[in-house]
């Protein structure tokens, strides 16, 4: 459905429960907060389903907006979720019951009854902003700040290749609506905890390079998270760490999960399609940023990733 159709659909319902994805980032949280506040401004009842992986870094954003479970008459809406496999554990019982998906992933599996998906957008926050405009919502500073959080975090503070003229126009309009960009930029892009810096030191020492330095791979064992006292929310943008090395065009991060699975993240330059590579692993995403979750040992997943690169014509 189009934005205007999604807006009309939202207008036709009155009670909402909004879902965020596993390992929540600024885009899914900012979208949920912006949409929730926007719907409330229209007199609707709206809450965000609590996510077991929400942490203190984002707590100020969703304060007063959470619920522990949907009400019986709630309409279930997901934001920035490409497939039901990305639902947090407490939302798994809602699989098959999600009525509207609002997303920007071309790999969206069509799991919801209805969907508004715009894969050309850099962030789902751009879509939510457009829908709120269609609803003629008066954008408050709180809504604008939440959507700026969404757009800025999914574009690396507008540094990533997915940033478009529309992205920058949306950001400008959010600032015009009352968002103070500097505190958000400082918190999410200009500040690192000591634990995060120590992790980056370990990653620097353990980076593997292939294809004459054009491909870099790093591994984050679960034990490092425990040893360094790292919280999930401190790993924002870590997926792009190896891609940031000079000369690297394909950056790969493999991170061990608490359930024994391995989370693979790819960040690529224009020479490679990250989504196509991750499709070989059962995942997907965008051309320049994609991922997959694989049940296997690190050594096995590392070999699978290298095979996926070769299958896409990349010699490693």
Image (tube, rainbow, N blue to C red):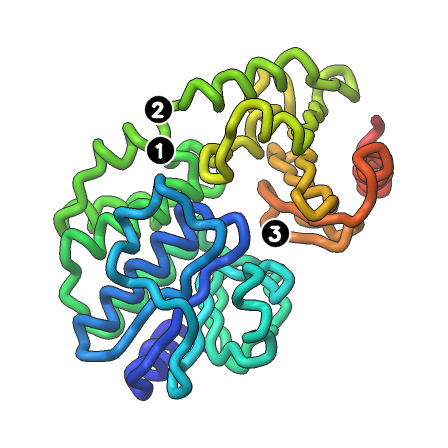
Residue 101 left/right relative to 143: right
Q: Residue at x 53, y 67 (%)?
A: 91
Q: Earlier in the sequence, mark 2 or mark 3?
A: 2
Please report the residue visible at 62 percent of the width from the left and 46 percent of the height from the top: 290
Residue contact between numbered discs 2 and 3, judged by CB atoms under 8 Å: no
- Labels 3 and 1: the sequence-earlier one: 1
Element class at badge 3: strand
Where is residue 1? Give x, y as percent: 46, 77
**Above or below: residue 240 compared with residue 258:** above
Q: Residue at x 74, y 52 (%)?
A: 279
Specify few, some or many for label 2: CA neighbours under 10 Å numbering under 14, 14-19, or 20 or more: few
In the rendered image, the vertical position of residue 103 relative to residue 179, given as above or below: below
At mark 2, the secondary structure is loop
Q: Is residue 165 visible?
A: no
- Closer-to-camera residue (140/235): 235
- Describe residue 138's horizontal placement relative to residue 280 as left or right: left
- Residues at marks 1 and 2, CA–CA distance in whole angstroms: 6 Å
Measure the C-alpha gap from mark 2 to mark 3.
27 Å
Mark 1 vs 2: CB contact within 8 A: yes
The residue identified by callout 2 is: 191
Closest to the observer: 126 or 64? 64
Q: Position of residue 199 (x, y in %)?
A: 56, 21
Residue hosting label 1: 188
Judged from the image, the secondary structure of the residue bearing numbered disc 1 is: helix
User: Do the residues under discs 3 and 1 have CB atoms within 8 angstroms?
Assistant: no
- Count residues near mark 1 (Cα–Cα under 10 Å), then give few for <14, some for 14-19, many for 20+: some
The label shown at residue 285 is 3
Packing grade of label 3 (10 A; few <14, some 14-19, many >=20) is many
**Does residue 308 appear left or right of residue 56 in this picture?**
right
**Residue 219 location, x and y as percent?**
69, 28
Mark-to-mark CA distance, 3 and 1:
22 Å
Residue drawn where x is 20% and y is 50% of the image: 173
């Amino acid at each position: 459905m189009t934005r205007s159709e999604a807006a009309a659909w939202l207008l036709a319902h009155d009670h909402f429960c909004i879902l965020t994805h596993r390992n929540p980032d600024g885009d899914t949280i900012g979208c949920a907060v912006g949409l929730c506040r926007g719907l409330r401004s229209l007199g609707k009842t709206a809450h965000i389903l609590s996510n077991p992986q929400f942490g203190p870094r984002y707590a100020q954003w969703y304060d007063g907006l959470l619920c522990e479970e949907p009400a019986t008459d709630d309409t279930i809406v997901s934001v920035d979720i490409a497939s039901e496999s990305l639902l947090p554990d407490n939302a798994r019982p809602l699989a098959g019951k999600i009525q509207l998906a609002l997303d920007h992933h071309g790999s969206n599996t069509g799991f919801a009854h209805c969907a508004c998906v715009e894969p050309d957008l850099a962030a789902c926050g751009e879509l939510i902003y457009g829908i709120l405009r269609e609803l003629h919502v008066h954008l408050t500073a709180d809504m604008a700040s939440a959507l700026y959080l969404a757009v800025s975090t999914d574009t690396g503070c507008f540094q990533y290749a997915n940033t478009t003229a529309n992205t920058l126009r949306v950001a400008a309009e959010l600032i015009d609506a009352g968002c103070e960009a500097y505190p958000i930029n400082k918190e999410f892009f200009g500040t690192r905890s000591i634990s995060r810096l120590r992790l980056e030191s370990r990653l620097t020492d353990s980076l593997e390079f292939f294809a004459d330095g054009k491909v870099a791979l790093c591994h984050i064992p679960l034990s490092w998270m425990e040893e360094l006292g790292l919280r999930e929310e401190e790993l924002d943008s870590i997926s792009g760490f190896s891609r940031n090395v000079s000369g690297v065009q394909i950056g790969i991060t493999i991170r061990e999960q608490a359930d024994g699975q391995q989370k693979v993240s790819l960040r690529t330059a224009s020479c490679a399609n990250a989504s196509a590579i991750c499709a070989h692993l059962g995942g997907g995403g965008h051309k320049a940023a994609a991922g997959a979750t694989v049940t296997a040992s690190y050594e096995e997943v590392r070999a699978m990733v290298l095979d996926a690169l070769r299958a896409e014509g990349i010699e490693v």
